[in-house]
Image: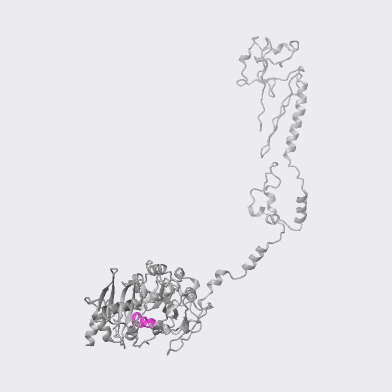
Amino acid sequence: MVAVKKYTLHKAEGDTAPPCAFFFSDQGCRNGDSCKFSHVRPGTPKACIPATSTPSGGNSVSSSDISSESEDEAPPVRSTPTPTPKAKKVRVTTTPVPSKVAVSVPDMDDPFRDTNDQIDLIKANANTQKAQKAKTPPTKKLTVRERKLQKKRKFEPEVEAQAQPEATEAVAVDVDPFKTPNSNPYPTTPKASTTKTPLKTKTPKSNKKAKTQAHTPTAAAASSSFSFRDLALPVASFSTPGSATAPVTPKAAVAPPTPAPAPPPEPKYTVPKSTPEGIKWQKAVLATRENPTYDAQFDFDRVKSTDCANATPGVGDWFQAKPFGAWCATNPHAVAIDCEMCLTEDPITKVQNHKALCRLSVVNASNPDEVLIDTLVNPLWPVKDYRSRINGIKREDLEPVEFTIAHAQAFMKALCSRETVIIGHAVHNDLSALRMEHHCNADSAMLFSVKDEENATCSLKDLAMGVLKREMPNVHDSVNDARVAYLCLEEGWLKTNGKPEPIVRTQKKRGGVDLFVHRIPKGCFPEHLENMFLKHTNIKPSEISPIEFNSDTGKTMAVFTTADHANLAFASISGEAKPDKTGRLQKRVYLKTGGYVCIRKNTSIRSRRLSK
């Protein structure tokens, strides 16, 4: 609201008293005849001024004595019509709640009123009527578009009418006439009741597809029901000569895992704790990790760095199993594994891979008769040495095989979680061949000791004889090796509560005798070792196996025709023979580069004494 000035100041004319500012206001002068100011409008001729217009006391007051802000006088209406300025129009300003407008209303019964006051009154009344009309909201004129929308809405009732019951009539509504017509006049109404039903529009195709997909199984549900048994892999079955084909047991129903008690705080690596099978093998897994050689044997970072240095194929394909979850609830949670390897060579760089996977066999540890997979694997590089004398695999067996290491990794990813216990003998070699980083293992090579040889590692052949009283064939069968490793741990370690008897090492019976050569530097080939024996002993080995390199050095076997040739070659090497940690005698052959190569006998001093 705009405040209206209550009075108007006037200058004194001649020797008369200055006009009273309040006399001509709407309220008038409260002092009446005792006012010391003049009650005559400025510009009025002296002849028309009544005698009472002079203030009492007869004293004239100068213009400097006027103080309109400190006096409360109000002037009466003048009687003589004089030319006066037109009354100012009152500007009415409204707020969200309209209020009364202050209008100057002259006294019509005053005989001294001016004719102009009547005109001002008429104008003020007109302004008041305009202000009252402003209270009523104007009727909105609908556009052509809005009229069309109203016709369509006749067939589509608004949500607002359905959401608000008749009880809303009792709500007091303060309608603001200055609000936009489309604004909501019910500010206290919930948001849901103010939404209107949109017009019918065509549903986009993408929305229709989304509705259809909502009724189909999601990708997550499909993946959770996927099993390693559903993989369509080009499996190439194989069996060594003289061994029966390993039957693959049909899919059997596996009971869902039961919740296990909470284990102690998490160690460095994952502990099997979520299934009864995992808990059964938990102590064996922890005991394997406590072996002094575990960190060196299962140092997968070292193997990766060697693969990077040699540009071994599949170096970037190392993988880890996924965490345990519902996706593997029906899978076996403990498996026995064994792999056969061969020697491959890059035809361009001549870099060799001594642990190229050529056969994969996995057995269910809960049911050792169930073979989960047994297949040949075609290496990525050409095969330099099939090692048929060890694994029985020949060229004609591998050439038609389509199963590769990528298929083997896909199978292991679908089978194993991080809590799956992988059982085997020297299982770190199998995992390196698979490019699989896994630390939930029960390794029979680390859980059994050798009698009278504290730091020695027993062979699977001696372990099978010591625990199972079973002879192992000379040619390796990976299915049989995996099953035997499991049975030795089951009978010799679990049933003895982790306190097995030491294994007696058996002496190998050979038609010819070999010498173990190790610490061979990189860049050395078998022909170099032949020349070394000729130079230092004048005896040429009948065969030198391919050199297997681990990190910076390699190892191999030098085979001689007879034991006498092997003993003579060892005795001809200059230098002192010293026993190693296992009690076997070995000598050093120094190289021009400053390093040396160790040549060791394969029988210990104690074994030779017993044989005598």
Q: Is residue 527 above or below residue 307?
A: below
Residue under the image location 68 percent in, 62 percent down: 204
x%, y% of residue 147?
77, 51
Q: Is residue 114 above or below residue 337?
A: above
Residue under the image location 77 percent in, 25 percent down: 119
Magenta span: 485-496
Residue under the image location 42 percent in, 82 percent down: 478
Q: In the shown orientation, is residue 538 left or right of residue 99?
A: left
x%, y% of residue 281?
38, 76
| Viewer-nearest residue: 563 or 503 | 563
Farthest bottom residue in view = 242
Quarter of the figure that contains the C terminus? bottom left
Secondary structure that dominates the magenta span: helix
Q: In the shown orientation, is residue 570 left or right of residue 414?
A: left
Q: In the shown orientation, is residue 492 left or right of residue 325?
A: left
**Is residue 468 among what the camera can see?**
yes
x%, y% of residue 608?
23, 84
Residue under the image location 71 percent in, 16 percent down: 42
Quarter of the figure that contains the N terminus? top right
x%, y% of residue 364?
44, 80
